[in-house]
Amino acid sequence: RGRAFIHEACATSGDGAGKRYLVTGAAGFIGFHAAKQLKARGEVVIGLDNFNDYYPVSLKRARAQSLSGLGVPVLGLDLNDGPGVAELFRLCPFTHVLHLAAQAGVRYAARNPLAYIQSNLAGSVVLMEAMRAQQPMPSLVYASSSSVYGLSRRFPFAEDDRADQPASLYAATKRGLEMLAHSYYNIYNMSVTGLRFFTVYGPWGRPDMSVMAFTRNILDGKPIRVFQGPNGTELARDFTFIDDIVSGVLASLDTSPPSADPKVKPAYRLYNLGNTQVHTVTEMVDTLQELLGAKAIVNYQPLGPTGDVLRTNANISLAHNDLGYTPRTNLRKGLEEFVKWYFAYYGPDGTRRSADEAGYIPD
Ligand code: NAD
């Protein structure tokens, strides 16, 4: 069924003038939204995901089901399955690869370091090898992260700032991915764009991340864990709404030069995609309490050596100038959208959760 399925999806004539997109990590938060938006404008899109259980699989299945209903098949395939990935490229020659699959999360890395090496480094190389074997080569847009700025204290972060002091293994693998992708550009002329996302949140979001994890606990009357830096310093984040991120992702795909012409050096590009308005975690919690109509029980904890940095803040001038990237959603508006989705998805009191989600305790 797999092959026929891919053939059929690949042969669908989209409005995209022969363009075909592969979205890795399509059952994930950002992949789901990006694939949906690409399909909405008439492109041929195929998704891939290994549906791992880092967070509840039911949410990944629901996203994939929704995509499938829109005509985007999401293949259950691990990037480390070299023959499977190569076969996929043979069956469906892609023009664009949006590589979002990854082992995400900074704290989990301390417990399962190899998962990060396998998905973010080895899996990415398997993917880029399959891309290289296809002629003409597709263009690559891949997800990096604000975490690569690590212990940098210069705000806001710009793309040419130091990124050699990772505070987590996750960050180290994302920086490693940037270097690997850069080498595919240098050696093979692959057109490559890296996107450093800053704390993305919104509908269909990630249950391991603060916005969703706090929402569950606030509604369940359970304490939430808020980390603090030295002397009670507040953690602060450049929270970025999913629709803004997707607009930057699509603009990156649309402006990616093809890797095809051997005489023209394509491009290696790297952009911050953030919001630029920084909020403390306490400010985020205050807004959530108000929107949920429930009080949070806050347990403050000192920030351990777990990988979180104190503050993130994006300089987005480069993405603005090159891609026209302009984030439009402030934290309050974005949280309103998130809460609306949460109640629609989990029921008005947030308790209509499937068995695997009910038992899930975020890291
Ligand atoms: P997500 O965990 O929801 O999505 C990633 C998906 O990749 C998951 O569905 C997972 O099952 C899949 N996956 C993992 N390893 C795989 C493998 N070896 N083969 C196939 N599929 C695999 O995360 P997300 O928030 O959607 O993040 C998307 C990308 O953006 C990731 O690369 C992440 O590191 C990056 N990023 C996210 C944020 C954020 O705030 N959400 C911030 C910075 C960077």
Image: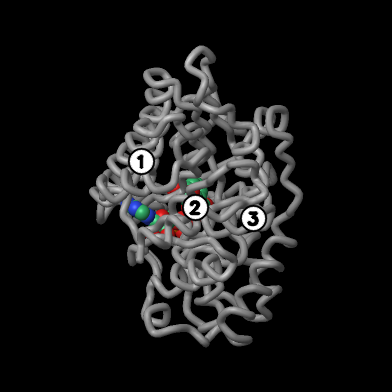
Mark 3 neighbour density, 10 Å: few (under 14) some (14–19) many (20 or more): some
Residue shown at 58% from the left, 32% from the top: 271
Extreme residue toward the top, this view: 263
Identify the element where label 3 is drawn: helix
Which residue is denoted by mark 2 in the rendering?
A: 10
- Using the numbered discs, state the Cα–Cα distance from disc 1 to disc 3 in whole angstroms: 23 Å
Earlier in the chain: of badge 1 and badge 3, it is: 3
Amino acid bearing label 2? Cys
Q: Which mark is residue 37?
A: 3
Is residue 64 in view? yes
* Residue depicted at 71% across the width and 38% down the height: 325
- Seen at 31% across and 54% down, the residue is 78
Quadrant of the drawing holding the N terminus: bottom left
- Which comes before the other along the chain, label 2 or label 1? 2
Asked whether the beta carbons under mark 2 and mark 1 sit within 8 Å of each other, the answer is no
The residue identified by callout 1 is 127
Q: Are dots 1 and 3 in contact, CB under 8 Å?
A: no
Q: Position of residue 69 (x, y in %)?
A: 56, 71
Q: Amino acid at mark 1?
A: Leu
Residue 234 appears in the picture as rendered = no
Left or right: residue 331 compared with residue 233: right
Question: Dot 2, crowdedness within 10 Å: few (<14), some or many (≥20)?
Answer: many
Image position of 342 (left or right of 119): right
Q: CA distance from mark 2 to mark 1?
A: 18 Å
The amino acid sitting under disc 3 is: Gln
Residue 260 pos. (x, y %): 50, 25
